[in-house]
Image (cartoon, rainbow, N blue to C red):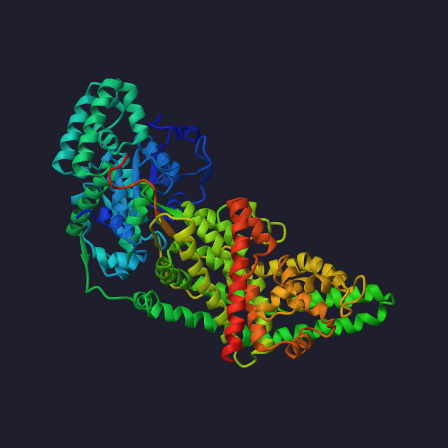
C-alpha cells in the first residue's frame, strides 16, 4: 500500500509472478509507442483500482523469458496534485517495479529530467533511461555524450527512436540485464542549499526510529514534508505522533520565513538549477541558435502594432472571402426560394393558407435561409484561422488591447466564440474563475456580432452599400468590438471592481489546415443555423405573418404588427427608424435573423431577398440602413443569450445586460443617425 | 537563478506571450513550455478549459450540434495559491 489514497495492486494481473517493468515519463514522450513495441499485441487494458484512469499492461518476451510491462500514467512530476501523479508515484514507491524505465524526450530534456530526478530521489536504484526522439534532437542540432550522461546520472541511458524502432533491442537488453542484477547503478540525486539540506537531515533523523525506514526512503519523505505534501504529512503523523510532527512543521515554517516562499517552489527551483548544471555536462549544442520561420512569423503576428494591423487585415480578408464567394451562392439560393413560392402558390386554393406558406414561411424563413452560404463560409474562414494556429496569436494581440480597457485577456476566447453564437460564449465564461472577469465578459459578450447578426449586417450592407459592403460589414464589427471594450472599461470601473488574474497563452505550431477537418467543423457549426431556421425562425415567421395580417392585412394601419410598431415609432424615429424597423427589432429578440424575416413579411415579398433589398432601398436611406444594422447588432441579446446570462450570472446580471444593451443601442443609434444626417 | 520563480513573476507582471517570456528568461520557447508544465503539475498554474461542461447546460443544446468551441491554443492562469509565502 502506498502513502496515499490510491491503491495499486499489479499482482492482480500478475498471477505468473513475472518480473515487472514500469514505464514512466512525461505525457507525449512516445511512452505508448515504446510500450507497444515492447509488448506487441500481448496487451491488456483496464483501469487502475478504484479510479477511472486507464491501466495498460502487456507481456514483453525476451530470449524465451516473459516480463510484465506496466505503462504508468504520463506525468511531469510526482507531487500529489493529480490522480495520475499519485498512481505513478505510489506504484514506484511501493516497490512494485523490478525496473523503472524512465522515457525522456531528448528534444526537451529539462522538463523530462525533472521527473527523472523525482524518481531517483525516491531512492529507486533500478532505473533505465530511454532517451527517446533522438532523431528530433538531432534535427535541432542537439547531441548527447551518452557515456558522460550515464556517468553523471548514474544509471544506464539508451538512445531510442520509438517510431523507427531504433535502440529498442538495446533497451530490452538493458532491462533484462538490470533485472538479472548484471547492472549496478549509482543514481545521482539533487543537492539543495545548505538550509534545506540541514532540515532534510534533521527530519530524516527524527524518522529513523520509525518503521517508515523499512518501506520508504527517508530523504524523500523529508523532502515531501518540506513541500507540505498532505499525503506524506498524514503518513508520517501516523508513525511519529503530534508532538514530533509539530516540531517538524515549526521548522518548516521557519525555513519558509527564511526563503519568503513556500518550500515546494524553493525545492523545485533548486532541483531545476541542479538539472541545468548536469545537462551542460553531456549535452552538446551544435551550431548557433537560429530563429525559425515560425519565430519570425510570430514576431510580426504578435507584435503590438504589426500584430494588430495583421489582425484587422485578416478580418477584412475574412469578410472579403465571405462576400466574394458567398454572394453568388446566396443569389442562387434566393432565386430558388423565390421560384419555390411562385411554384407553390397556384396549388394552394385557400387564401389564408397560401399567404401563410408563401409570404410567411417561404418569404420569411427563405429570406433568412438564403444567407446560409455566407454563414457557412464565415465558419470555414474561422475554422481555417483556428486550424492554422492563428487564433492563439490573435489572442496575444487582443489581450494587450483588452488589458488597456480593464478587460481580462482570457475573455478573448469567449469573444471569439461569440462570433459564432453568443450563447456558448456566455457559457464559456464559467472557465474564468474570477467573478469580476466572468461578469464583465458575460455582459460584453452580446455586443460581439454573432452569425445571426451577420445575416442582418451582410443583408443591409449588400442592399445599400454594393461597392463597399465588406468594408461596411467590417466597420460595424469593429464599432461593436470597440463598444464592447469601452463597456468593459466602464463596467470594470464603476460596476465591478477587482484585480485580474494573470495568465499565459501557449502558441501552437503553425499548421496547414486539413480541408476535411475544416469542412466537417464548419458544417457542424452551420447546422445550428439550419436547425434554428426550422424551429425558432419558423415559429417567429408564422407569428409575424399572423400579427401583420390580423385583424386586417398590413397597410391598413390596423394590423397588430402595425399597432405595435406605431406605438414604438416615436422612440425609434429618434434613430431615423420607422415602425417596420421597430417591429423587426422586437421580433429579432426571438432570434436576430428574424429582423430580415420580419421585413420580408411586412413588405409582403414573395420574390426573395433581392426583391426585399429593392423595396427597402426605396423606403430607407443608406444612413438609416447603417443605423439599423448597428442597432440590431447592439440592442437586446436574443432570448437564448438572456437565458444563458441568467443561468450563469442570475437574474440581476441578466437584467443589467438587457438594460445596458438597450440603453447603449439607443444612444449609439441616435448619435450615429443625427451625426450622419448632419455630416452627409 | 530560480527560473521557475522568475517565470511565475513574469506571468504575474502581465506577460502572456510565451515567446516573450522565453526571451526575458534567456531560454528556449520549448523550455518555457516545459517549465509551465512543471508548474502546472505542482499546482501553481492551471489550464483554463473553456468548453468543458458548457454544452450540458446550454439552452440551445437541443438544436446545436455542440461544435461551437473554437480555440486551439492552451491558456494557463496563475492559481490563487500564491507562490510568495502566504499559506
Q: Quadrant of the N terminus of chain A?
A: top left
Quarter-of-image position of residue B39: top left
- Picture residue at 72% right of the left edge, 68% below the top: A602
In this figure, what is the number of numbered marks?
A: 0
Of residues A245 and A15, the one drawn nearer to the viewer in this rendering:
A245
x then y, percent, for residue A119: 27, 37
Of residues A471 and A242, the one drawn nearer to the viewer in this rendering:
A471
Of residues B42 and A455, the one drawn nearer to the viewer in this rendering:
A455
Quarter-of-image position of residue A401: bottom left
Judged left or right of residue A609, residue A23 is: left
Q: Is residue A452 above or below residue B45?
A: below
Q: Residue furthest right?
A: A349
* Residue A403 visible in the snapshot: yes
Quarter-of-image position of residue A140: bottom left
Q: Is residue A680 above or below residue A268?
A: below
Judged left or right of residue A552, residue A478 is: left
Of residues B20 and A106, the one drawn nearer to the viewer in this rendering:
B20
Q: Residue furthest front?
A: A570
Judged left or right of residue A498, residue B5 is: left
x then y, percent, for residue A442: 48, 52
x then y, percent, for residue A647: 55, 45
* Residue B67 visible in the snapshot: no
x then y, percent, for residue A362: 73, 67
Amino acid at each position: 500500500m502506498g502513502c496515499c489514497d490510491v491503491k495499486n495492486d499489479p499482482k492482480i494481473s500478475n498471477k505468473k509472478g513475472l518480473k515487472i517493468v514500469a514505464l514512466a515519463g512525461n505525457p507525449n514522450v512516445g511512452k505508448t509507442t515504446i510500450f507497444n513495441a515492447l509488448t506487441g499485441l500481448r496487451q491488456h487494458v483496464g483501469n487502475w483500482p478504484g479510479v477511472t484512469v486507464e491501466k495498460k499492461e502487456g507481456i514483453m518476451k525476451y530470449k524465451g523469458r516473459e516480463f510484465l510491462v506496466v505503462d504508468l500514467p504520463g506525468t511531469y512530476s510526482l507531487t500529489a496534485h493529480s490522480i495520475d501523479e499519485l498512481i505513478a508515484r505510489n506504484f514506484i514507491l511501493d516497490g512494485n517495479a523490478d525496473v523503472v524505465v524512465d522515457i525522456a524526450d531528448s528534444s526537451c530534456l529539462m522538463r523530462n529530467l525533472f521527473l527523472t530526478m523525482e524518481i531517483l530521489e525516491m531512492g529507486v536504484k533500478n532505473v533505465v533511461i530511454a532517451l527517446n526522439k533522438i532523431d528530433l534532437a538531432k534535427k535541432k542540432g542537439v547531441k548527447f555524450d551518452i557515456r558522460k550522461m550515464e556517468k553523471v546520472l548514474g544509471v544506464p541511458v539508451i538512445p531510442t527512436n520509438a517510431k523507427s524502432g531504433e535502440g529498442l533491442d538495446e533497451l530490452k537488453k538493458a532491462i533484462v540485464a538490470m533485472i538479472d542484477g548484471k547492472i549496478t547503478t549509482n543514481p545521482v540525486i539533487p543537492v539543495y542549499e545548505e538550509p534545506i539540506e540541514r532540515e532534510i537531515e534533521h527530519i530524516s533523523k527524527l524518522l529513523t526510529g520509525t518503521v517508515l525506514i523499512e518501506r520508504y526512503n527517508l530523504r524523500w519523505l523529508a523532502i515531501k514534508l518540506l513541500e507540505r505534501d498532505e499525503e506524506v504529512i498524514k503518513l508520517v503523523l501516523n508513525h511519529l505522533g503530534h508532538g514530533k510532527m509539530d516540531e517538524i512543521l515549526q521548522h518548516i515554517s521557519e525555513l519558509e520565513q527564511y526563503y519568503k516562499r513556500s518550500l515546494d517552489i524553493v525545492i523545485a527551483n533548486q532541483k531545476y538549477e541542479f538539472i541545468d548544471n548536469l545537462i551542460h555536462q553531456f549535452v552538446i549544442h551544435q551550431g548557433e541558435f537560429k530563429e525559425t520561420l515560425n519565430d519570425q512569423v510570430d514576431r510580426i503576428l504578435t507584435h503590438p502594432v504589426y500584430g494588430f494591423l495583421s489582425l484587422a487585415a485578416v478580418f477584412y480578408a475574412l469578410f472579403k472571402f465571405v462576400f466574394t464567394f458567398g454572394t453568388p451562392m446566396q443569389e442562387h439560393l434566393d432565386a430558388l426560394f423565390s421560384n419555390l413560392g411562385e411554384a407553390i402558390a397556384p396549388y394552394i386554393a385557400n387564401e389564408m393558407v397560401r399567404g401563410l406558406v408563401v409570404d410567411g414561411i417561404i418569404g420569411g424563413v427563405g429570406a433568412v435561409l438564403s444567407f446560409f452560404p455566407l454563414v457557412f463560409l464565415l465558419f470555414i474562414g474561422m475554422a481555417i484561422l483556428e486550424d492554422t494556429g492563428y487564433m492563439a496569436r490573435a489572442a496575444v494581440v487582443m489581450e494587450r488591447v483588452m488589458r488597456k480597457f480593464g478587460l481580462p485577456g482570457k475573455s478573448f476566447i469567449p469573444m471569439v466564440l461569440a462570433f459564432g453564437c453568443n450563447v456558448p460564449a456566455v457559457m464559456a465564461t464559467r472557465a474564468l474563475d474570477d467573478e469580476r472577469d466572468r461578469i464583465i465578459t458575460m455582459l460584453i459578450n452580446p455586443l460581439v456580432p454573432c452569425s445571426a447578426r451577420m445575416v442582418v449586417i451582410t443583408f443591409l450592407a449588400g442592399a445599400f452599400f454594393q461597392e463597399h459592403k465588406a468594408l461596411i460589414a467590417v466597420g460595424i464589427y469593429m464599432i461593436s468590438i470597440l463598444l464592447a471594450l469601452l463597456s468593459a472599461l466602464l463596467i470594470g470601473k464603476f460596476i465591478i471592481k477587482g484585480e485580474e488574474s494573470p495568465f499565459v497563452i501557449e502558441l501552437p505550431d503553425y499548421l496547414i489546415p486539413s480541408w476535411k477537418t475544416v469542412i466537417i467543423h464548419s458544417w457542424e457549426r452551420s447546422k445550428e443555423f439550419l436547425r434554428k431556421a426550422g424551429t425558432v425562425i419558423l415559429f417567429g415567421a408564422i407569428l409575424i405573418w399572423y400579427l401583420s395580417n390580423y385583424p386586417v392585412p398590413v397597410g391598413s394601419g390596423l394590423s397588430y404588427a402595425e399597432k405595435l410598431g406605431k406605438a414604438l415609432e416615436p422612440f425609434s424615429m429618434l434613430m431615423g427608424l420607422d415602425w417596420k424597423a421597430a417591429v423587426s427589432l422586437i421580433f429579432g429578440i426571438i432570434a436576430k435573423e428574424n429582423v430580415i424575416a420580419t421585413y420580408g413579411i411586412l413588405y409582403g415579398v414573395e420574390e426573395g431577398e433581392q426583391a426585399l433589398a429593392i423595396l427597402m432601398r426605396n423606403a430607407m436611406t443608406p444612413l438609416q440602413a447603417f443605423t439599423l444594422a448597428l442597432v440590431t447588432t447592439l440592442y437586446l441579446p436574443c432570448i437564448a443569450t438572456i437565458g444563458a446570462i441568467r443561468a450563469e450570472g442570475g437574474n440581476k446580471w441578466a437584467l443589467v445586460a438587457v438594460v445596458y444593451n438597450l440603453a447603449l443601442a439607443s444612444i449609439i443609434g441616435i448619435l450615429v443617425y443625427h451625426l450622419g444626417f448632419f455630416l452627409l | 537563478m530560480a527560473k521557475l520563480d522568475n517565470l511565475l513573476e513574469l506571468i504575474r507582471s502581465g506577460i502572456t506571450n510565451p515567446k516573450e517570456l522565453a526571451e526575458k528568461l534567456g531560454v528556449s520557447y520549448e523550455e518555457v513550455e516545459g517549465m509551465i508544465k512543471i508548474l502546472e503539475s505542482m499546482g501553481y498554474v492551471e489550464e483554463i478549459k473553456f468548453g468543458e461542461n458548457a454544452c450540458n447546460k446550454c439552452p440551445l443544446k437541443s438544436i446545436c450540434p455542440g461544435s461551437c468551441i473554437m480555440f486551439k491554443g492552451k491558456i494557463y492562469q496563475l492559481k490563487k495559491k500564491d507562490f510568495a509565502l502566504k499559506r
